[in-house]
C-alpha cells in the first residue's frame, strides 16, 4: 500500500453573505489539475457534535460552467466528523469513508490551528 499525504490550508470565506456560502475555502493542485474546496461547518441534530461538510471541485470545469451559466456537479463530497483525540498529533476531524481523486482513494483529516493573534493579516 502506498501512503500519500496531500496538505493544503483552508481559510475563512470573507465573501460569505448567507448560509448557502461556505464557511471555509481552499485550493490545491494534484497531478497537474487545480481543485477548489468548499467547507460548511454544521452541528449534529442534537447539537452535541460538530462536523464539516466538504465539496471538491475541478477548478477549470467549474469556471467554464460558471461562464456558460450551466450547472456543475462537484467531483467529491464527504463529511469530516469530530475525532476522539487520544494523542496531541491526532486530527481534530476525520472522514469515515474515502473519496476518489486522481484515481487514488483518499481519507481526509482536518487539523485545526488557530493563530495566537487572530487579527493578524498574514
Image (cartoon, helix red, strand yellow):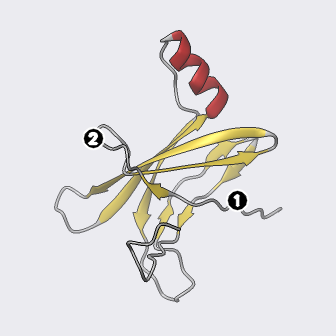
User: What residue sits right under mark 2 in the picture?
Assistant: 17
What residue lies at 37% left-to-right and 43% top-to-bottom? 15
- In the rendered image, the vertical position of residue 99 relative to residue 94, given as above or below: above
Q: Quadrant of residue 108?
A: bottom right
| In the image, residue 21 above or below residue 88 | above
Q: Nearer the viewer, mark 2 or mark 1?
A: 2
Q: Residue furthest front?
A: 121
Question: Residue at left 30%, top 37%?
Answer: 20
- The percent coordinates of residue 61 (x first, y second) are 63, 24
Disc 2 is placed on an element classified as loop
Location of residue 30 in the rendering, given as x and y in whole percent from the top left corner: 75, 46
Q: Which mark is residue 51?
A: none
Of residues 2 and 75, the one drawn nearer to the viewer in this rendering: 75
Q: CA distance from mark 2 to mark 1?
A: 30 Å
Q: Quadrant of the N terminus?
A: bottom right
Q: Position of residue 47 (x, y in %)?
A: 18, 63
Q: Nearer the viewer, residue 44 or 58?
A: 58
Expressed as whole percent of the image width and height from the top left, the position of residue 68 reads 54, 10
Q: Quadrant of residue 118?
A: bottom left
Going from N to C along the chain, the mark reached first, 2 or 1, is 1
Left or right: 15 as drawn, with respect to 105: left
Q: Secondary structure at mark 1?
A: loop
Looking at this rendering, what residue extends furthest in the left direction? 46
How packed mark 1 is, by other alpha carbons closer than 10 Å (few <14, some 14-19, many 20 or more), is few
In the picture of the structure, the residue carrying the numbered disc 1 is 6
Q: Residues within 10 Å of mark 2 (few under 14, many from 20)?
A: few
Identify the residue at image location x=68%, y=42%: 101
Kindly identify the residue that appears in the image at 66 percent across and 43 percent down.
100
Query: 83 left or right of 35?
Result: left
Amino acid at each position: 500500500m502506498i501512503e500519500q499525504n496531500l496538505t493544503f490550508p483552508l481559510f475563512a470565506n470573507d465573501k460569505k453573505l448567507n448560509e448557502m456560502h461556505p464557511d471555509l475555502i481552499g485550493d490545491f493542485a494534484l497531478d497537474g489539475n487545480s481543485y477548489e474546496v468548499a467547507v460548511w461547518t454544521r452541528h449534529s441534530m442534537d447539537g452535541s457534535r460538530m462536523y464539516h461538510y466538504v465539496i471538491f471541485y475541478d477548478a477549470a470545469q467549474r469556471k467554464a460552467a460558471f461562464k456558460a451559466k450551466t450547472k456543475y456537479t462537484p467531483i467529491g463530497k464527504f463529511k469530516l466528523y469530530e475525532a476522539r483525540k487520544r494523542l496531541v498529533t491526532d486530527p481534530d476531524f476525520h472522514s469515515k469513508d474515502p473519496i476518489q481523486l486522481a484515481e487514488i482513494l483518499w481519507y481526509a483529516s482536518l487539523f485545526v490551528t488557530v493563530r495566537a493573534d487572530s487579527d493578524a493579516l498574514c
